[in-house]
Amino acid sequence: MSFPPDRILLGPGPSDVHPAVLESLGRPLLGHLDPAFLPILDEVVADLRTAFRTDNAATLPISGTGSAGLEAAMVNLIEPGDPVVVGVNGVFGGRLAEVARRAGADVHTVERDWGRIIEPEAFLDACRTHDARVAAIVHAETSTGVAQPVADIGAALGDTDTLFVLDTVTSLGGIPVEIDQWQVDAAYSGTQKCLSVPPGLSPVTFSDKAVAKLKGRSTPVQSWYLDLSLILAYVDGAGGRTYHHTAPISMLYGLHRGLKLLLEEGLEARWARHARLGGMLQDGLVEMGLPLLAQEGHRLPQLTTVGLPDGVEEAKLRRQLLDEHGIEVGGGLGQFAGRAWRIGLMGHSASERNVRLVLAAIADLLG
Ligand code: PLP
């Protein structure tokens, strides 16, 4: 068998990578301080600001996957003993809470069943009750397929001392993300979802309010590697370029190309593509009599959770989909484990051809 086998990546990430991005990964290396490389880094930063819809100076790609961005957002903004409120209605809210605990925060969770949103008012009530220093929530919960409403949360926290942290790992480039308009203080994403770049970098952005908190800390950031002020000394050209760690050059070539593809298509056009194809997939699944598990009206187009008929052996069927049709989808997690699939239509994977292929393959397998 040739390696790697032919696959269509329709799981929760990574998504298929555009050939132009793959080509960019194979280009000759430059040093991370080479004057020919630095303009590429500067363009990545500028294009990330456009993608996040922000003017935040502190916008950059963190070396590492989405979890590195998550950890960077939390450890830079939390000091031991800080009250922190976290919304938990899936795996990644739980991860935020765990990272906050490890950073020494006094964590209060607002929990909802998997597949349900967290009502903004309930989340804000918890922030007020606990006088939260940091309030964190997941925009696109990849474990459930729920799109969390966030605009009202940012608007209400904007004039308070609470810093609003948003997980945009699966939302950036897939559905509208409006960092400045929503008054988000820290957001992080991942390259391998709707940006369709391999896993390995985590775009992040921090507001001036967040940077002020960072500068006023009375304790050092618990992580040396993820200390934003040290990383910015390299990324921010205005301050001279101080070595912090060796930048992952090839990954930055890939992200550079992936962002150009996003902006050439246009953010709104890409959101519209995801909305149209996600709707087509979800309609097709419902026509087959399969239940959609995310709350109606709050379903992500780029990640669909679908229940399987009783008696179906989920893992076995998923393996058949991979072996016989070359299509990867994800199994259910947590409350959905063993009885659901997660079907991603992210970035380059979001095409009409792929929707038709996966619907036909599921119909074939379920007989
Ligand atoms: N947050 C969300 C919503 C995710 O979907 C993921 C990964 O799937 C992460 C965080 C963690 O990202 P990574 O697996 O790239 O570390």
Image (cartoon, helix red, strand yellow):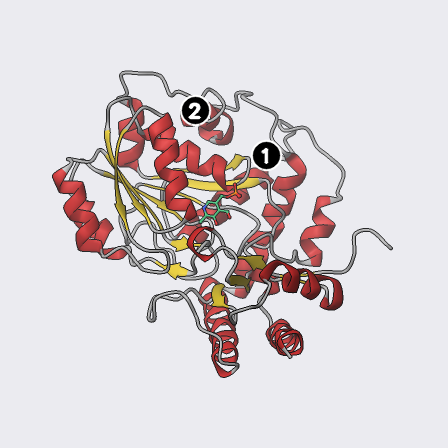
Q: Quadrant of the C terminus?
A: bottom right
User: Would residue 274 appear left or right of 161 to someone viewing this image?
Assistant: right
Q: Dot 1 corresponds to which residue?
A: 38
At horizontal 31% and vertical 26% (from top left) the residue drawn is 214
Residue 11 visible within the image: no
> 336 or 67: nearer the eye?
336
Q: Is residue 38 above or below residue 224?
A: below
Percent across and percent down for residue 76 are: 36, 28
Percent across and percent down for residue 123 are: 21, 49
Q: Are marks 1 and 2 in contact (CB under 8 Å)?
A: no
Residue furthest out toward the bottom: 287
Residue furthest out toward the right: 1
Q: Amino acid at mark 2?
A: Asp
Q: Amino acid at mark 1?
A: Leu
Q: Dot 2 corresponds to which residue?
A: 227
Q: How many marks?
A: 2
Binning the other alpha carbons within 10 Å of mark 1 as few (below 14), some (14 to 19) or many (20 upward) gives some
User: Would residue 222 appear left or right of 160 to someone viewing this image?
Assistant: right
Q: Secondary structure at mark 2?
A: loop
User: Would residue 246 appear left or right of 84 to someone viewing this image?
Assistant: right
Q: Quadrant of the N terminus?
A: bottom right
At horizontal 53% and vertical 39% (from top left) the residue drawn is 42
Percent across and percent down for residue 45 are: 49, 42
Give whichever of discs 1 and 2 has the lower sequence position: 1
Residue 24 visible within the image: yes
Q: Is residue 244 above or below residue 200?
A: above
